[in-house]
């Protein structure tokens, strides 16, 4: 490699790497600290990969610029042109750039609108399910209130009734949503939007919290719809008017 014999062990062979030019057919990714410092020909890396969280891109750029200038002044690299300014790019920034540009931005917008519309339709369907049985539940509630049932206990009974419905709906939607990327990736030809790079499907753990939050929101929405309907039906007068006979 660049005139040196390096005692390395091949850990894996890959066809592409984020920092390697797509027209490059031969490249190597090496752990820099493990390379010998007394190599006959100093290695000239094309890029560095830093792993970690909370990295200050500005500080990294400053350190790289200083190191580049020291490297050039050391006489290893000669030339009249000034060295190219270092470019520090984070994974999140590149991901946001790809997601918000061109057709990718349109896809993100479409999926976001679909998710919001699906959530709204799900809440609307839940409201219809609550209203469909509201009259029967209202009659039962009027009887139970004469027996000393409190509002808190009534809400608990409503949650017991609606929780299975909501959980089945939310979990089914979450399962379908998790399978969609696996099914759509080969159909849509997503590598065309990533410059030919392979598209890897990854599960975000934060989606679990999102699904649970959606379930809690749906249950709260159902209780609110039921309470509003009971107030409109004036359940306190049901028994007195004789609608139960």
Image (cartoon, rainbow, N blue to C red):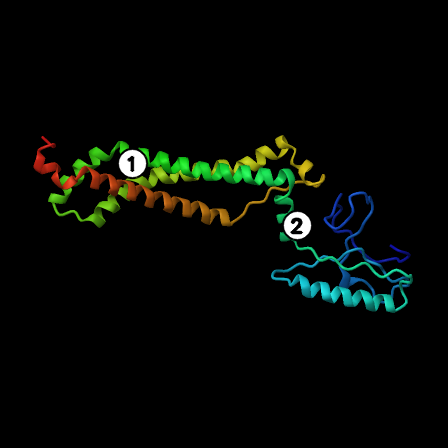
Q: Residue at x 37, y 46 (%)?
A: 217
State the image coordinates of residue 191 (x, y, percent, origin top left). 68, 37
Horizontal relation, residue 77 to residue 181: left or right: right
The image's mark for residue 94 is: 2
State the image coordinates of residue 45 (x, y, percent, origin top left). 81, 57
Determine the secondary structure under disc 2. Answer: helix
Determine the secondary structure under disc 1. Answer: helix
Using the image as rendered, state which of residue 196 and residue 107 is in the foreground: 107
Horizontal relation, residue 245 to residue 198: left or right: left
- Pointer 2 with pointer 1, Cβ within 8 A: no
**Distance in Å between CA atoms under marks 2 and 1:** 45 Å
State the image coordinates of residue 135 (x, y, percent, origin top left). 21, 33
Q: Is residue 159 above or below residue 92?
A: above
- Residue 172 location, quadrant: top left
Say which quadrant the C terminus sits in: top left
Name the mark nearer the viewer: 2 or 1: 2
Say which quadrant the N terminus sits in: bottom right
State the image coordinates of residue 58 (x, y, percent, origin top left). 68, 63
Q: Residue at x 19, y 37 (%)?
A: 233
């Amino acid at each position: 490699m660049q005139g040196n014999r390096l005692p390395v062990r091949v850990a894996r062979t890959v066809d592409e790497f984020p920092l390697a030019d797509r027209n490059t057919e031969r490249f190597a990714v090496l752990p820099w600290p493990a390379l010998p410092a007394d190599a006959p020909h100093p290695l000239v890396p094309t890029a560095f990969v830093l792993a970690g969280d909370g990295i200050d891109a500005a500080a990294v750029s400053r350190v790289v610029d200083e190191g580049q200038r020291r490297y050039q002044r050391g006489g290893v690299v000669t030339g009249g042109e000034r060295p190219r300014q270092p470019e520090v790019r984070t994974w999140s920034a590149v991901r946001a750039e790809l997601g918000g540009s061109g057709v990718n931005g349109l896809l993100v917008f479409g999926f976001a609108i679909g998710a919001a519309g699906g959530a709204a339709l799900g809440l609307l369907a839940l409201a219809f399910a609550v209203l469909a049985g509201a009259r029967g539940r209202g009659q039962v509630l009027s009887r139970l209130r004469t027996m000393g049932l409190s509002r808190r206990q009534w809400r608990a009974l409503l949650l017991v009734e609606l929780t299975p419905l909501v959980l089945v709906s939310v979990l089914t939607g979450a399962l379908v949503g998790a399978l969609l990327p696996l099914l759509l990736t080969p159909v849509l030809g997503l590598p065309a939007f990533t410059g030919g790079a392979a598209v890897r499907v990854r599960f975000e753990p934060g989606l679990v919290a999102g699904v649970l939050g959606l379930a809690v929101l749906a249950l709260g929405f159902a209780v609110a719809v039921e309470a509003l309907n009971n107030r409109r039906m004036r359940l306190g007068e049901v028994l007195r008017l004789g609608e139960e006979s």
